[in-house]
Image (cartoon, helix red, strand yellow):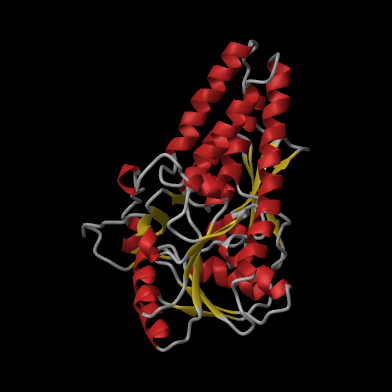
Amino acid sequence: MRPGCLILTVTKGSEIPLRTIDWNDEFETISMIDQTLLPAEVRTIECDNIGFLCEAILSLRIRGAPALGAAGGFGVALAAIKSRADSMEALLDDLRKVGDIIRSTRPTAVNLAWGVDRVLDAARDAYDTDGIRRIVLQEAKAIADEDVKLNKRLGAHGGELLHDGDTVLTHCNAGRMACVDWGTALGVVRSAVEAGKEIKVIACETRPLNQGGRITTWELVEDKIPVTLITDSMSGHVMRRQMVDCVIVGADRITQDAVFNKIGTYTHSLVAKEHNVPFYVAAPVSTFDFERMEDEVEIELRDGGELRFMAGKQIAPLDVEVYNPAFDATPMENVTAIITENGVFRPPFLLDEVKYKM
């Protein structure tokens, strides 16, 4: 394999690889589904250098808080294998520098930094350079394996909140494509369906990049779970008409006072509160930021071209000023409960209880 090359492997038809992101032992690369091509094409990318990994994160080829946690861990492992450092001090210094680069790609999503830091912390247990390379890869793989198990546990807890015949409204994509597998918000739906309940989903398109329309609906159609696509601005209409039994969204960071998720989430929470619709957040404990408040978190601003163009076609003046935050913050008073792998918690709650309760 040529150094620096980006290998693209087309998966024919609608066959879904087992995991959204994983480690390829044969080529020593990070294998991931290119989510920018969905739903038209399922294609896996093999990333063999940090530059391509960062590009994949920035361009949202890989996205979703839990999946980014795995990406951060695998990125450190990839850097360890590629580094030519011949001393522990030099190798650890290389990994710290790469960790800083990876963290900077998506400042709002806490799991990315969490995955990087967890693997860097594990490296401290090594006694030589070979040990560092072995340990960081083991730890990165452990993050990915745990993500699947934790999401299944989270889904089981959340599934108990749903009743047979419920219709769930969701925003953006918090399914298997946002995780290593199974999903958070959609994991709750999948678990309820697996338990024998009939559940329908209303998916908001999630402008400007349409992760709900492109990815969430695709996942649910693949799973044969009934789904209806609406525009983001229709959520008030469908909730006022009592077409929704609850809202379930994912999260990119949860502070003591707010939930950060895809832009538009806050608006849905206000509508849900007005119409007495339960508003649930589904996220693993790793998404909690136990040390910060809302005003201490940087919200990522993305390129204005995402609003000026759609599918490569210009839809707004090229010189129009654009404000394009990727996330917004939903205050805790709008949240009915947070669903985690450790159970369901209703604000106000003690964060230590969320973190350690089993």
Left or right: 323 as drawn, with respect to 12: left
Residue drawn at (70%, 40%), measured in percent from left and top? 142
Percent of width and height locating residue 72: 56, 38
> If the image is split into quadrants, where does the N terminus sit?
top right
Residue occupying image coordinates x 59% and y 54%: 34
Say whether residue 346 is visible: yes
Q: Nearer the viewer, residue 239 or 222?
A: 239
Depth order, front residue of 10/258: 258
Toward the left, the furthest residue is: 320
Relative to 330, 132 lies left or right: right
Q: Is residue 197 left or right of residue 294?
A: right
* Residue 228 % position (x, y): 53, 81
Number of numbered discs overlaid on the protein picture: 0
Q: Position of residue 17 (x, y in %)?
A: 72, 57
Depicted 94 relative to depicted 207: above or below = above
- Residue 327, how many percent across, how many down? 38, 55
Q: Is residue 331 left or right of residue 153?
A: left
The residue shown at (63%, 54%) is 341
Is residue 52 visible in the rendered structure shown here? Answer: no
| In this view, 219 is above or below 70 | below
The relative height of residue 68 versus residue 222 in the rendered view (above or below) is: above
Q: Residue furthest bottom?
A: 241
Residue in the picture at 31% in, 56% down: 324
State which quadrant residue 33 falls in. bottom right
- In terms of depth relative to the viewer, which is nearer, 8 or 290? 290
Position of residue 54 relative to residue 285, above or below, is above
Residue nearest the viewer, comparing 196 with 62: 196
